[in-house]
Image (tube, helix red, strand yellow):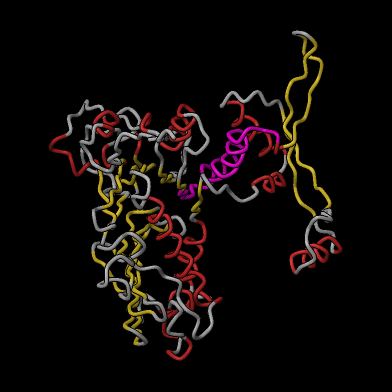
Amino acid sequence: MLVQFTIENFCSFKDEHTISFLASSDKSLLEENTFSVNDKTRLLRTTVLYGANASGKSNLFKALHFFLSYAVDSGPRMQQGDPIRVIPFLFSKETADAPSSFELVFYLKANESEPIRYRYGYTVSKDHIIEEHLFAINVLREVMLFTREGQTITSNPTWFKEGKNIKQDMVRENATFLSVCAQANGTISGKIIGYFRSIWILSGQAGFPPFAMMMEDGKQLHDKILKFLHFADLQIDDFKKKDMSLELDPEIPDNDFREFLKKKSANGGHSVKLAFAHALYEGTQKTGEHYLPEEQESTGTQKLFEYAGVIIKALEQGSILFVDEFDASLHPLIVENLVKLFNSPKDNPHNAQLVISCQSVHIMTNRIFRRDQIWFCEKDRYGASDLYSLLDFDEHVRKDASYNKNYLNGKYGAVPFVDEIRLHMDRA
């Protein structure tokens, strides 16, 4: 369960910015869009990020992806001297060679006890970790589990016993202490690393992993995905997958890639293809079904099938799902209903969290979102991104305000200043 994520000096984010998933205490807002962690804390089920093109929305997703990947993989996968592929804000001489900082606050449930709140973060340059820390809330106070300044690491012998088994020379300067502890089978670090791995960060533009593979879960998942496709009125009666042997295209040039394909084909390489069943009619009478291969389906149909597997799994497992450009190739009404799935306590009983960026202002209304669920990204004249919530305008936003109209009229910022486009053609 995510509480907040903070970044500084990464890509277009020059200064420190925090996106929060804490629900405000305003009782007039949609309470069903939140869930309770304990007696004092409620979190948001969904969060949406708006902004002009190139305002920095995607960079927020990139920042979280970098933070999680580096925290998890730097220990087992990097070697001494490997560069840290962090990208600072490059449009200022003050920050181009300065370190970047990240911090995530989250809850983890241990057995059947009340979830524990953790705060983990680090500061890195392009070749070493400058600072790293992990804290936890114990009853009413925050307890230090470990802190790190360069290669000087201090572990709490009571609350982070796994840290005392890690000698300092076992921790490379470009590896997180958290990942090294997890490699040594540390209990707390292992749970945190596992949690980081479970957070999905996807792009609606680039496409998702091949979730057709999830069909191996059997008929139950098949029926759920089919029901999911039916809700979007796609006129799909069924679908099936087929393992296709890998055929070597004679047009592929004779190079390393061709050699790779040869080896894969020789080793029984295959790919998964999907086919979708549509009703076959004679006049107005249905006489059977005709299967179309996936590449002949519309982009929207393919996108919804990709969404089906990941959304079903997220809702069933209570996962955290980040999707950049969530509305790509989808009708606004479908986008609205997908968001409503996560906002609904009935459809989302395990409190999965969905964080999206999109351009569909159709869903920016007070009947779908609370003010604290709507965030904006805006670039200043120097190329740096700002990040703020509609809640920051609380004193000026009426309870019945038309959020989307106000946004398009520029009242909340984060819209492009577009001059009238003209094409001038000189006659000869």
Q: Is residue 410 left or right of residue 47?
A: left
Q: Is residue 56 left or right of residue 297?
A: left
Q: Main secondary structure of the magenta part?
A: helix
Q: Residue furthest left?
A: 395
Location of residue 283 with respect to 280 vertically, above or below: above
Location of residue 412 with respect to 386 vertically, above or below: above
Q: So how many labels did they put on this image?
A: 0
- Image location (x, y in percent) of residue 354: 43, 44
- Image location (x, y in percent) of residue 258: 78, 64
Which residue does the image show at 76% across and 68% down from the upper left?
Answer: 255
Which residue does the image show at 32% across and 55% down from the upper left?
Answer: 4
255 in magenta: no
Which residue does the image show at 43% across and 78% down from the upper left?
Answer: 177
- Image location (x, y in percent) of residue 275: 74, 36
Quadrant occupied by the C terminus: top left
Q: Which residues are magenta?
A: 296-322
- Image location (x, y in percent) of residue 341: 46, 34
Location of residue 84 with respect to 205 vertically, above or below: below
